[in-house]
């Protein structure tokens, strides 16, 4: 707790362009939660390098993600918004937590196994250690809650395990965080293969809708989305994964319940339904894209936001790190 507000922490990696899956599962909720919680939002560039990145592109994606956060409505006066590599305490706590984490636990992580298969030529130590760095991010700020998509649930569980393990070995040091998962949209699926999550690093870019896609591209991608042969617009994820995914997207962008969406499209053909989803998404993204472009033209402002965010984050992180170093027996001057 900070004052009377619970502490909330989350982050997104500046890899590629964000998809509407990232927006729905993460960023959109970040905006909604900033009134109720003491929010800390990071750009996780240290996580990003666990997969090989082009340096110039990573720099560009970093500012682009910052501008997107701001364009979506994250207010740097209300939240701490910062770049992970600007606060050295993340790497320092991660090192310490490594000694409270077992190799076997990391080898069993689903994301590690998936990414190892995808990047078989670069299964580096950082890729395996990714969840420990994420635990350090969260635990440094005495976080109460972490809003993420369901794909991150396992990482949150291991964060809790590491926190409890450390607290039991010494004395209560870390707050044990809870995950927050949205009912609708915690997992948006690929438009062409609705059995897979929509991912920014998808092999086929037609299955993912990017936050930067223009109107025609968005509509074309939704037109090609896979549905089924039942010709009925009903939410039934196990039997109708494609249609259910489109209904989730429509429901979130339209701010309506799934049941209302089903009613709205009763008797409607799949072609018209897909066009309506595409048009709604394009309409909602247009003002965000315009604002993002405007912000990207003002580099001084973006740098000021990062500088102030880093100072505030570092100040808070230092308190936890000092506590940890004292407990483990690092000699203090
Ligand atoms: P990559 O494809 O590069 O691994 P990613 O698309 O999974 O990236 P991250 O930066 O790892 O993106 O995730 C940012 C946030 O977006 C996380 O909270 C994650 O849970 C959420 N998220 C990612 N994909 C989806 C999705 N398809 N549906 C809902 N939430 C998602
Ligand atoms: N691994 C996360 C990004 C991330 C994160 C965090 C999320 C890095 N550190 C701390 C929540 C809390 C992902 O979304 N892929």
Image (cartoon, rainbow, N blue to C red):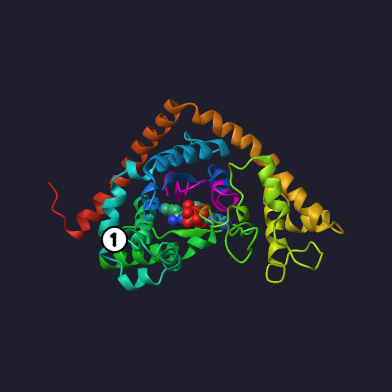
Q: Is mark 1 within 8 Å of ligand 2?
A: no
At horizontal 16% and vertical 58% (from top left) the residue drawn is 329
The residue carrying mark 1 is: 97
Quadrant location of residue 238?
Answer: bottom right
Q: Residue 118: x percent and y percent?
A: 45, 63
- The quadrant of the picture showing ligand 2 is bottom left
Q: Is residue 29 left or right of residue 259?
A: left
Identify which residue, 300 or 193, lies in the foreground: 193
Q: Residue 294: x percent and y percent?
A: 55, 28
Other residues around mark 1 within 10 Å, as few (<14) / some (14–19) / many (≥20): many
Identify which residue, 316 or 17, lies in the foreground: 17
Q: Residue 227: x percent and y percent?
A: 73, 63
Is residue 260 at least partly visible in the picture? no
Q: Is residue 101 left or right of residue 202?
A: left
Residue 34, magenta (yes or no): no
Quadrant location of residue 202?
Answer: bottom right
At horizontal 21% and vertical 54% (from top left) the residue drawn is 325
Residue 24, magenta (yes or no): yes
Is residue 187 at least partly visible in the picture? yes
Residue 166, compared with residue 46, is above or below; it is below
Q: Residue 277: x percent and y percent?
A: 73, 50
Q: Is residue 11 left or right of residue 289?
A: left
Residue 278, compared with residue 266, is above or below; it is above
User: Which region of the structure is painted magenta?
Assistant: 1-27
Q: How many marks?
A: 1
Secondary structure under badge 1? helix
At horizontal 28% and vertical 66% (from top left) the residue drawn is 100
Q: Is residue 246 left or right of residue 62?
A: right
Identify which residue, 176 or 64, lies in the foreground: 64
């Amino acid at each position: 707790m900070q004052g009377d507000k619970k502490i909330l922490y989350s982050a997104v990696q500046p890899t590629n362009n964000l998809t509407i899956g990232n927006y729905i599962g993460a960023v959109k909720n970040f905006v909604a939660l900033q009134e109720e919680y003491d929010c800390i939002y990071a750009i996780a560039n240290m996580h990003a390098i666990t997969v090989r990145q082009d340096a110039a592109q990573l720099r560009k994606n970093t500012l682009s993600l910052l501008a997107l956060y701001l364009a979506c409505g994250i207010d740097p006066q209300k939240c701490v918004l910062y770049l992970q590599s600007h606060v050295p305490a993340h790497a320092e706590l991660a090192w310490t937590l490594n000694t409270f984490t077992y190799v076997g636990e990391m080898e069993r992580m689903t994301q590690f196994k998936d990414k190892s298969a995808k990047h078989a030529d670069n299964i580096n130590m950082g890729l395996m250690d990714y969840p420990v760095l994420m635990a350090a991010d969260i635990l440094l700020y005495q976080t109460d809650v972490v809003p993420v998509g369901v794909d991150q649930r396992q990482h949150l569980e291991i964060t809790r395990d590491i926190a409890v393990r450390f607290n039991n070995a010494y004395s209560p040091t870390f707050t044990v965080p809870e995950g927050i998962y949205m009912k609708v949209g915690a997992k948006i699926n690929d438009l062409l293969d609705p059995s897979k999550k929509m991912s920014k690093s998808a092999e086929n870019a037609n299955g993912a809708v990017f936050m930067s896609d223009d109107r025609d591209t968005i509509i074309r991608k939704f037109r090609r989305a896979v549905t089924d042969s039942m010709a009925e617009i009903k939410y039934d994820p196990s039997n109708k994964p494609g249609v259910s995914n489109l209904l989730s997207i429509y429901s979130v962008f339209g701010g309506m319940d799934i049941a209302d969406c089903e009613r709205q499209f009763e008797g409607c053909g799949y072609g018209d339904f897909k066009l309506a989803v595409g048009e709604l998404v394009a309409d909602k993204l247009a003002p965000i894209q315009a604002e993002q472009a405007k912000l990207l033209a003002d580099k001084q402002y973006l740098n000021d936001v990062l500088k102030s965010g880093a100072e505030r984050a570092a100040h808070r992180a230092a308190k936890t790190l000092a506590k940890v170093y004292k407990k483990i027996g690092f000699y203090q001057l």
